[in-house]
Image (cartoon, grey):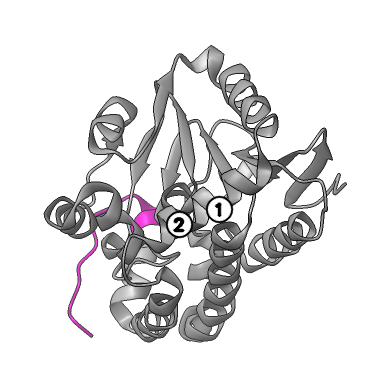
Amino acid sequence: MIDKGPVLLDITDGIARLRLNRPDAANGMSAELLSALCDAIMVCHGHPDLRVVLLSGEGTNFCAGGDVRAFASKGEKLPDYIRQATAYLQNAVTGLLRLEAPVIASVQGFAAGGGGFGLVCASDIVIAAESAKFLAGATRVAMAPDAGVSVTLSRLVGLRRAMSILLTNPVIPAAEALQMGIVTKVVPDDELADASLALARELAAGAPKALAATKRLVWAGTGTSIEQCLSEEARTVAELSGMADAREGLAAVIERRKPVFTGR
């Protein structure tokens, strides 16, 4: 049980309810939140009776991605902060992929950036509210995709579509995300919590070793290991975060204006 802090966790009847808990910041991912997320996932790994993880976000958004205000406040020290945050994010994604228990993401509002969109792509099943929206967003702030998105997204939607999503950053409505294969099921907004919990209970009643083996085989069968790509993602993101364009991109988001990139 983790009942306070930026990540909440309770495990009952084999179901772990893992919740991002910074609703006032749209569950934006600071290094502190990511550290807490890693700790909570490790608790899940150590729980002997865990059957399924239900991942959600408190408030109106699942996760709006990285905490751009925290990033922007670091100035030229941003690369060091990004290296720390990215390490936590990679560990979290790896932890979810390596969990024997299936992971269900329950998504309302925005799922954006490496934090929100990345966790969605790394989940085994995704239930989305009708009004949910998805956004890659990294290149919009002069960064590169992280959380394994550079690998997972193409496996979900195909290379050409993934390239377009990552380079042009469209806001993808839930219905379109369903057609693309980013989400598993779309439900009315007021049915999201019940539908997600019902599926979690269904999986919790299944044969745990068979579900675990199936999850492992499906992810392993998609080709190059996602984990093998994470270190290159981290190196690239840290390198880009030290450029003036990254600081300009973050400032533009905060100031709600179009960025002016110079390639420096």
Which quarter shows the C terminus? bottom left
Q: Which sits in the foreground, 106 or 75? A: 106
The residue carrying pointer 1 sits among few (fewer than 14), some (14 to 19) or many (20 or more) residues within 10 Å by Cα, namely: few
Q: Position of residue 84 (x, y in %)?
A: 59, 79
Picture coordinates of residue 224, whole percent (x, y)? 33, 72
In magenta segment, residue 258: yes
Q: Is residue 235 above or below residue 221?
A: below
Confirm or deny contact between disc 1 and disc 2 (CB under 8 A).
yes
Q: Is residue 16 left or right of residue 221?
A: right
Query: x%, y% of residue 145?
Result: 34, 66
Residue 43: x and y in percent read 79, 58
Q: Tell me the magenta residue range.
A: 252-264
Residue that sits furthest to the left in the current view: 160
Q: Main secondary structure of the magenta part?
A: loop
Q: Is residue 102 visible?
A: no
Q: Residue at x 63, y 25 (%)?
A: 202
User: Which residue type carries mark 2?
Assistant: Leu
Residue bearing the label numbered 1? 213
- Residue 205 lies left or right of residue 71; in this view the side is right
- Looking at the image, which residue is at 34% across and 74% down? 246
| Numbered disc 1: secondary structure | helix
**Disc 1 marks which amino acid?**
Ala
Kindly identify which residue carries mark 2: 217
Where, by quadrant of the figure, is residue 60 drawn?
A: top right
Residue 114 in which image quadrant = bottom left
Local packing at callout 2 (Cα closer than 10 Å; few below 14, some 14-19, many 20+) is: few
Q: Say which mark, if any, is on residue 243.
A: none
User: Against 50, is 43 above or below?
Assistant: below
Residue 242 left/right relative to 57: left
